[in-house]
Amino acid sequence: MGHRSLDRFFVCPGDVSGDVVRLGSGQAHQVREVLRLRPGDMIAVLDNTGWEATVVLQLVEKGLVQGMVVERHKVTTEPAVDLTLYQALVPRTKFELVLQKCTEVGVSRFVPLVADRSIARDVGSKLDRWRRIVLEAAEQSGRGLIPLVEGPKESDVVLGRSEGQGLRLLAVAGQEGEALHGVLASGRPIRSVELCIGPEGGFTCRELERARQGGWRWVSLGRRVLRTETAAIVASALVLYELGQMEP
């Protein structure tokens, strides 16, 4: 039988006092009622600084779980490349799929983009839900840090600015753009990438021209046309793979 990995929980700084860890009511419910863990069982606790602690449970009661740290170590799963994904707003289930899967892949920051052809535009109270999805995906996938989910930005603002954090790539359909491999195999070290994915129907000609003037490099994801949620996941994985961040 294979070794069972520990269940992982991101906690707030106030949940840790020295070597004593206390989980809040929501996580306590998951530990006690869902996972059926008991005193003596182990969990992994993360503080969103890149460190992970192995904790032995001492108290498992309704609404309260307490344990003691027995080991701390640096998480080694985080990419060395900071990848920001600007994802045009799409219908709810598709956008949530992008958040979940791209967190698993290794995206560091998500910025919802309001594009000319975005059907979904009203974010409202969705940010809290989106951040919860990213948190759970980070726990499940072994991340050491929780990716940021920022508030939405207009495409004109994002595409039109001339400055950026590192290499800026805009995915275009079919073979209109440069080959992604060639762009990333420049030989110079790349530590930060901004990746922009358009809505269903793609960016408008006006947006594409604005992006070109703003210094974004157009990249192709191949000969076939990908749905926007597929493009986000594939492009994120390819960027990190080409930069050596998917190595075991």
Image (tube, rainbow, N blue to C red):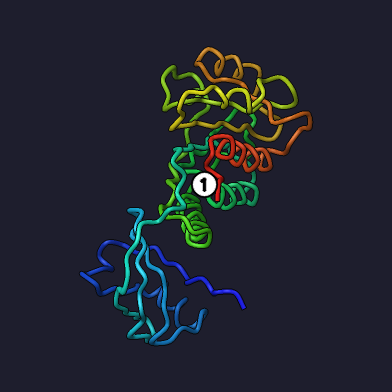
Instruction: Examine the rendered structure and indicate whether residue 34 appears above or below residue 152.
Output: below
Q: Residue most toward the left?
A: 18
Farthest residue, direction top: 213
Residue drawn at point x = 47 percent, y = 51 percent: 125
User: Viewed as shown, does residue 21 lie left or right of 32?
Assistant: left
Residue sitting at 67 percent across and 38 percent down? 231
Q: Position of residue 132 (x, y in %)?
A: 47, 58
Residue 85 lies, with reference to residue 154, above or below; the image says: below
**On screen, 67 above or below 108?**
below
Q: List the residue tagged with mark 1.
A: 106
Q: Give the residue furthest to the right.
A: 224
* Residue 208 in which image quadrant: top right
Three-letter code for the amino acid on which mark 1 is drawn: Gly
Q: Secondary structure at mark 1?
A: loop
Does 242 sit above or below residue 149? above
Percent position of residue 53, x then y: 34, 67
Q: Quadrant of residue 44?
A: bottom left
**Residue drawn at x 59%, y 14% as measured from the top left:** 209
Spot occupied by residue 215 in the image (x, y as percentages of width and height): 51, 16
